[in-house]
Image (tube, rainbow, N blue to C red):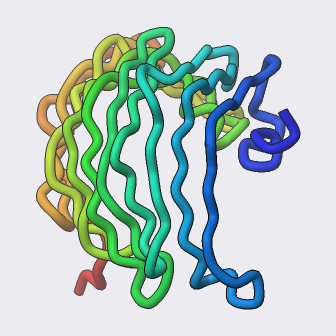
């Protein structure tokens, strides 16, 4: 619990379990050059009242200042997510991560406690580029979703539609929802990760 609460702050809503083996090699005088391998057999946490547990071992390593995720699969209520790839921990922080599966939208509340959300997102995305300028390819399908913010008078409910990522552009395809007693159809795009003139 103390370790996960450090990472997730107050977002944990029940007792958590983490069990496995972590091996570190190198000099403690140079922590950035340590080589680390992890094999986690058991993981359980309840985040915003959504129970999450590993499906198979979680395996990752850190060497030459590169975090490499070789096996990661998390299951829970309306959630079955797998991920793999790498993140450079120095320099320009290059990214190469693939994520696929279903995610319970209630987990958005763990990012911002003023958000209330529910529904399902099915995603198949690859994230490249760098931390400062991510390049995302793939799509996210939203089903029976809802998002509201405490300070706003109306939220969005019964959200259904598709978001398509093409590197530095997000295309909204026929996203339909309800707000204030009416129906809202959202289409269009916006760019991110670069200066737009």
Residue name at image x 76 percent, y 28 percent: 12
Residue name at image x 71 percent, y 36 percent: 114
Q: Nearer the viewer, residue 164 or 49?
A: 49
Q: Nearer the viewer, residue 165 or 176?
A: 165
Residue name at image x 45 percent, y 26 percent: 74
Residue 104 visible within the image:
yes
Q: Position of residue 138 (x, y in %)?
A: 15, 46
Q: In this view, does 107 lie above or below 171?
A: above
Residue name at image x 61 percent, y 26 percent: 43
Give the quarter of the image for residue 11: top right
Q: Nearer the viewer, residue 115 or 20?
A: 20
Q: In this view, does 86 lie above or below 1?
A: below
Is 110 on the left or on the right of 69, as rendered? right
Q: Is residue 72 above or below residue 146?
A: below
Q: How many marks?
A: 0
Residue 188 visible within the image:
no
Give the quarter of the image for residue 130: bottom left
Q: Where is residue 119 in the image (x, y as percent from the top left)?
A: 42, 15
Q: Where is residue 136 in the image (x, y as percent from the top left)?
A: 22, 58
Q: Position of residue 158 (x, y in %)?
A: 36, 12
In the orientation shown, which residue stands out farthest toward the right?
A: 2
Give the quarter of the image for residue 56: top left
Image quarter in which the C terminus is found: bottom left
Image quarter in which the N terminus is found: top right
């Amino acid at each position: 619990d103390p370790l996960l609460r450090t990472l997730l702050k107050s977002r944990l809503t029940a007792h958590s379990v983490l069990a496995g083996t972590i091996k570190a090699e190198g000099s403690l005088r140079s922590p950035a050059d340590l080589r680390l391998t992890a094999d986690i057999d058991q993981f359980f946490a309840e985040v915003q009242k959504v129970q999450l547990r590993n499906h198979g071992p979680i395996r990752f390593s850190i060497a030459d200042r590169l975090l490499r995720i070789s096996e990661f699969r998390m299951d829970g209520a309306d959630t079955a997510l797998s991920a793999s790839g790498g993140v450079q921990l120095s320099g320009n922080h290059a990214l190469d991560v693939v994520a696929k599966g279903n995610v319970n939208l209630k987990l958005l509340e763990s990012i911002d406690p003023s958000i209330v959300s529910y529904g399902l997102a099915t995603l198949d995305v690859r994230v490249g580029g760098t931390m400062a300028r991510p390049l995302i390819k793939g799509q996210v399908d939203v089903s029976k979703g809802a998002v509201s913010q405490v300070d706003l008078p109306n939220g969005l409910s019964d959200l259904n539609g598709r978001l398509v990522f093409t590197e530095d552009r997000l295309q909204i395809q026929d996203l339909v929802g309800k707000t204030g007693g009416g129906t809202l159809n959202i289409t269009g795009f916006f760019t991110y990760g670069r200066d737009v003139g």
